[in-house]
Image: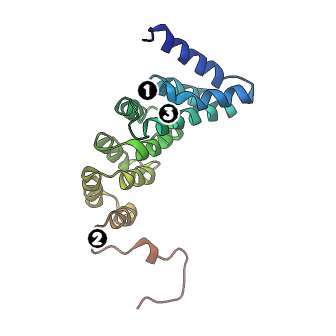
Amino acid sequence: MPTNQEPKKMLEDLLAGIRSGDDKVRTEAWQSAGALAAAAVEPLAQVMVTESGEVSRAAKRGLWQITRTVGAPRAGQKPQVVQGLIELLDSRRPNALRREVIWMLSEIGHDESVAPLAGLLSDVELREDAKAALQRIPSPRSLEALEKALTDAPEDFRLSIAQSLRQRGRQVAGLACVKLRPVKQTAVKPL
């Protein structure tokens, strides 16, 4: 059974590897992040937003590695990683990080992710990503959140939500399909 020092040492080694100037060391580090799972979520997010260039990208790749590792069938720590990701959606965090987290949750989130993602539907910068994540989460709650958002959303966002509902198999009356919406001015009159 591992001692408390071993996971702490593993995390320190991971972060040192991520920050390494050696491409091979950095790559090996982010590829091994899945083994630490929930313990590495917050530290990697911190590196992602405070470092620059390849170090930031390696931290992001490490977060994705964790997401994909715990998303595998019979993998452990998925609830803990999902909770850690949800905490990263805090509005004080940079939108670049929050956007990545939204997409991570779209892969491994379920009912527990719906309310935090639905809360982002009012954020003009992140609403399309949040809507797409809700569309991807296979839960009746995510469908309910999209249906509620359709009634509450500003006019310029309603067509997009309607399209997500259609993708989930719902009929949406009164709103045109986005595929039928002109993208540029034309002289052609509708039938």
Which residue is more in the foreground, 7 or 130? 7
| Circle 3/circle 1 CB separation < 8 Å | yes
10 Å crowding of disc 1: few (<14), some (14-19), many (20+):
many
* Frontmost residue, 125 versus 117: 117
- Which picture quadrant has residue 117? top left
First in sequence, mark 3 or 1: give its number: 1
The disc placed on residue 66 is: 3
What amino acid does circle 3 point to?
A: Ile
Hey, what amino acid is under mark 1?
Answer: Ala
Query: In the image, what residue occupies the spot 47% across and 28% down?
Result: 41
Q: Nearer the viewer, mark 2 or mark 3?
A: 3
**Callout 3: 10 Å neighbours few (<14), some, many (20+)?**
many
Label 3 to label 1, Cα distance in Å?
Answer: 8 Å
Quarter occupied by the N terminus: top left
**Earlier sequence position, callout 2 versus callout 3:** 3
| Residue 150 as seen in the image, left or right of residue 21 | left
Residue 180 in the image: state x and y as whole percent.
44, 78
- Name the residue carrying label 2: 172
The coloring applied to the image is: rainbow
Residue visible at 40% across and 41% down in the picture: 73
Image coordinates for residue 140, horizontal then vertical, percent: 25, 53
State the image coordinates of residue 88 (x, y, percent, origin top left): 43, 32
In the rendered structure, find residue 38 and report the number of the disc placed on it.
1
Between the residue at mark 2 and the residue at mark 3, the CA separation in whole angstroms equals 37 Å
Q: Which amino acid does label 2 sit on?
A: Val
